[in-house]
Image (cartoon, rainbow, N blue to C red):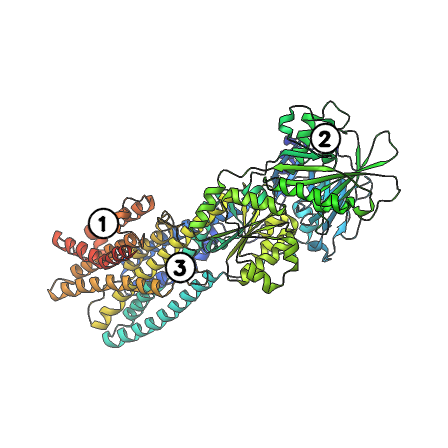
Amino acid sequence: MSQTFDPQHTFTGLSEAEAAARLTDEGYNELPAEGQRDVLHIALEVAREPMFLLLVAAGVIYLALGDAREALMLLGFVFVVMGITIYEERKTERVLEALRDLTSPRALVVRDGEKKRIPGREVVRGDLLLLAEGDRVPADAVLLVSNDLMADESLLTGESVSVRKSASDGKAPMAAPGGDDLPFVYSGSMLVQGQGVAEVRATGARSEIGKIGHALRDIEVEATPLQKETRKLVRNLAWGGAALCLVVVVVYGLTRGNWLGAVLAGITLAMSILPEEFPVVLTVFLALGAWRISKQHVLTRRVPAVETLGATTVLCVDKTGTLTQNHMSVKKLYAGSAFLEPELAATDLPEAFHELVEFAILASEVDPFDPMEKAFRELGQRTLAATEHLHDDWELVHEYSLSPQLLAMSHVWQAKNRDEFVVAVKGAPEAVFDLCHLDTQRLQALSAIVQSMAAEGLRVLAMANATYHGAAWPAIQHEFEFQFLGLVGLADPLRPTVRQALKECGQAGIRVVMITGDYPETARTIAREAGLTVGEVITGTELGSLSDGELAARIRHANVFARVTPEQKLRLVNALKADGEVVAMTGDGVNDAPALKAAHIGVAMGGRGTDVAREAAAIVLLDDDFASIVHAVRVGRRIYDNLKKAMAYILAAHLPIAGLTLLPLMLGWPLVLTPVHIVFLEMVINPACSIVFEAEPEEAGIMRRPPRNSTDPLFGGKTLVMSILQGLSVLAVVLVVYGYALHRGQLEGEARALAFTTLVLGNLGLILTNRSWLRTIPAMLAVPNAALWWVMGGTVTFLGLVLYLPGLRELFHFAPLHADGLLLCFVAAGGSVLWFEAWKLLRTAKR
């Protein structure tokens, strides 16, 4: 099927039934998945974990000691721990799979005669693809229509130069990529210019990229600072624990003459020290955090970016579509020497304005996607329907695209029943004035008019026309003899959520910088309407003339940048980063990709953004709304706060367990903990740190404090000290209870039960007090957290079973506790966190 470019042609495409049948027969349009983790893979990974191996080793030693019941109990716990771990890992894996599916490239296809955007993996052979600049091609296809189309095929060919595409003549078979004027596009390549329509010929493994798919592997992403810090902490604790375990084995063996018991004591200590929860918690928090953010129309393409959100100090945002609704309407026209507000013109325009609207439409796409061009067409259909100024029968034969050098674009039309071509141009007023070669007096007069329209917050465009009789197209638009027609002022209302979101940013210590291609006075007016502190306005022209030093000085006081090209965004990002800011940058176009990649957090527009921008960004806004970015920052702060609490709790919870394993040995007391006790405690710690703290609501005033310093470690000095003090206080009261029981001559089983119960209750106290480092436990009890009560209830229930169910009590080597003993445990455990509660009250009083 061959076709030259015909904008009026209607394509039908496959029916939904045909597409579904081919999807079933040929499979999804994706490369064979590698490295997918099903339940079996996760179980095998868990079986290689140090904690699992230590539990198995302890069970084997109990068997060697002839204690089969203890061994079986311990090995039974192995499967319980494995089950909990597999559940958590699988939950995280499902979240990540869902995020990968949500953020996968989309394809615009025609089915049953209607345009439809679908996931790229659902494209099938025979689908009609509507392609545009910035799209990533989802499948190998033959071009039916090519309008100034160019593609970057470096992923397949290694050639960095983009290649020109042409429409198929219907004869050439599908060929390998490489070279200009091929009528084919290939899966994975990027369109850098133009538009086209293509019919899919090969998908998935049958595509060119599929044939070399085994050579493509996931790029190893560098670990984030938080991941590096966590790994370092785990490594240091593991080495320290290994050294202590060796000391315990030697001391126990030499002093008590029982080397199997010594190894068992060493394993117990290793289990108590090993902080296997740290990496799990980090993964769970970031993955579930990304999922929570996605519920607010913000997709996280790179999960580690979640940790950076809360540290954002500068938000660089586009005006159009982000601060505004991206729904434009024509508010004012200027032609000849008169103004007109089209809304007051009902269904007819004065003759003087007919040509201005006519050429605004001719300078736009036939089937416009841009809201500005939609506004021109809507106005024309409403006011020119009964005139000769609408030209649905004209053929578009050539285009001149917008460029950083000339902010204007032209369409060349073959007019019906005329032996000449008609050229329509629209663009920035200064660019169109230049094309029309206006004299100085006219230029000054028109510039003043542009200034007055921009002061009303209107986006101002200029229109001009020309005729052409040549055989070859001029190389540049300047070679046409344009005649100035007039000015069009468009209004794009602010989103209703913007003013409140900007106010929230101000309270949170986040500076908002507006970047736009609009006229400076338009940008200034919109910024003021939004409530943005304007300060100095810097234009793209000024930006180009500033040295890096001058820009660094001025960028601190300028919050509005106008007439900025996408390429200049990269320079702004680098200048802000050099000034120590943590930068989030929005973008939607092909040329925005470098700035999005360079920013700490690149934010792509999901609605109007190109695939190039989305792939360069860390997060994607599905609704293109500025308020969604602010909400993402809020969630990012909450995630980091809760992650910090969880990490502090883990360290605090492990300290008394390790101390209670080591100190009785050093003091010559009977050992309190064995592997079975450690497993019980791990069953409390694991869900508490990965589920309870992750589900905690945000702290009050989370958006009324300055951003955290991105270079501050998770375990800063104060956090580390407070966490250690919490752990030591629980250890101290447990040792006092245990020592007191032994001193009174109570039996070893009763003393162990008292110490263990105090330890478990102290651990629950640590959970309650670490829910907030600002509010006390009584205040936090009113804050809902369903996971907390499940963990608390389950822990107390199981503690009751091991204390009072004879079979379990014997396995744990306990004696029954009486009411006075339980009361002692509750009082001691409560007392272990009282100092931290008092510290919170003192801290609040000082504020």
Q: Residue furthest front?
A: 441
| In the image, residue 751 above or below residue 533 | below
- Identify residue type, mark 3: Phe
Residue at image mark 2: 353
N-terminal-most mark, 2 or 3? 3
Secondary structure under badge 1?
helix
Secondary structure under badge 2?
helix
Residue 801 is marked as 1
- Residue 416 horizontal side relative to residue 316, left or right: right
Picture quarter with the C terminus? bottom left
Is residue 458 among the parts visible in the rendering? yes
Picture quarter with the N terminus? top right
- Residue 572 horizontal side relative to residue 234, left or right: right
Residue 789 location (% of width, % of height): 29, 45
Residue 740 location (% of width, % of height): 14, 64
CB of mark 1 within 8 Å of CB of mark 3?
Answer: no
Who is closer to the viewer here, 767 or 805? 767
Residue, x 25% and y 75% (percent of image)?
257
CB of mark 1 within 8 Å of CB of mark 2?
Answer: no
Residue 766 location (% of width, % of height): 28, 56
Residue 57 location (% of width, % of height): 35, 64
Within 10 Å of disc 1 (Cα), the crowding (few <14, some 14-19, many 20+) is some
- Identify residue type, mark 2: Phe
Query: Of tags 1 and 3, which is closer to the observer?
Result: 3
N-terminal-most mark, 1 or 3? 3
Secondary structure under badge 3?
helix
Is residue 90 among the parts visible in the rendering? no
N-terminal-most mark, 1 or 2? 2
Who is closer to the viewer here, 274 or 836? 836
Residue at image mark 3: 278
Who is closer to the viewer here, 150 or 99? 150
